[in-house]
Amino acid sequence: MIIIYDKEDYKDGDSSVPFLDRDLFYIRHERTAAGDKTETQKWVDNNNYVPDPNGDDKVYKHYVPYNEIFKVINDRVVKSNSRRQFIEWLENVAANKLGIENRSITGRQQISRFDYDEAADHYVSSICDWQENIFRGASDGDGGGMKKDTPKDSDLAKKVRAAEEKLFAALAT
C-alpha cells in the first residue's frame, strides 16, 4: 500500500495548484502480501528456474532485495518536484523500460487521490517485484532481505545480474 503526500496535505502548499502539479512531500509504503502473481510465477518457472535436488527451489526469490529497489524509488520522491513528475517517471520506468502494464493516469481531466495512489502502488509494487529479478533455485541467501540473493547456478546468476543492470539503468532515467 502506498500513500503519497504533497505539501498541501500538510498545509504548506497552495491549495489552488492542480492535484498533479502539487509538490511532493513524503511517500508512505507498507509492503503487503503479493496479489495474484500467477503470470510472474509462470514467467519465472519458464525462464529463471533451476531445479535443486536438495529442495532449495520451492521459494520465489528476489536477486536484488525488494527494499533496496524501493529505496531508489523513495529517493526519487525527493528529486521529483510534483506528483506529475513522479508518476510520469514511474510510468516510464515500468511501462517503457521494464515492460510492465501501463496504467497511465496523467492524460485524464480529473484524477482522484485514490486513482493516483492506486497507480503509484501498481508501478512501485511491479517494479520491486519485477519478474526478471525473481528466480527459483539454490542460492546463497539474502540475509533477511539485506543483501543480494545470488543463485548458485552460474547461468542463472548471469541472468539475474543482467536483469539488475537493466533495472537500475531504468531507475536512473
Image (tube, rainbow, N blue to C red):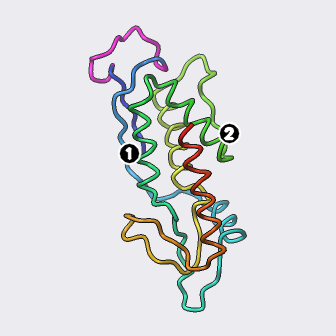
Depth order, front residue of 80/155: 155
Which residue bears the numbered disc 2? 96
Q: Is residue 17 magenta?
A: yes
- Residue 77: x %, y % from top left: 41, 33
**Taking 50 as reference, is 18 above or below it?**
above
* Residue at 57% across, 57% down: 164
Question: Total of numbered circles in the picture?
Answer: 2
Q: Which amino acid type corresponds to the residue marked 1 in the rendered image?
A: His
Q: Is residue 124 magenta?
A: no
Depth order, front residue of 133/103: 133
- Residue 83: x %, y % from top left: 47, 25
Q: Upstream in the sequence, badge 1 or badge 2?
A: 1
Is 100 on the left-hand or right-hand side of 144? right
Residues drawn in magenta: 8-20
* Residue at 66% across, 40% down: 95
- Residue 161: x %, y % from top left: 59, 63
Q: Which of the labelled discs sits on residue 147, or is there none?
A: none
- Residue 111: x %, y % from top left: 53, 23
Q: Which amino acid type corresponds to the residue marked 2 in the rendered image?
A: Asn
**Can you tell which of label 1 and label 2 is closer to the viewer?**
2
**What's the CA distance linking mark 1 and mark 2?**
24 Å
> Please, what secondary structure does the residue beneath circle 2 have?
helix
* Residue at 32% across, 15% down: 13
Q: Magenta part mainly helix, strand or loop?
A: loop
* Residue at 65% across, 79% down: 50
Residue 113 sits in which quadrant?
top left
Is disc 1 surrounded by few (<14), some (14 to 19) or many (20+) residues within 10 Å?
some
Depth order, front residue of 22/50: 50
Which residue bears the numbered disc 1? 29
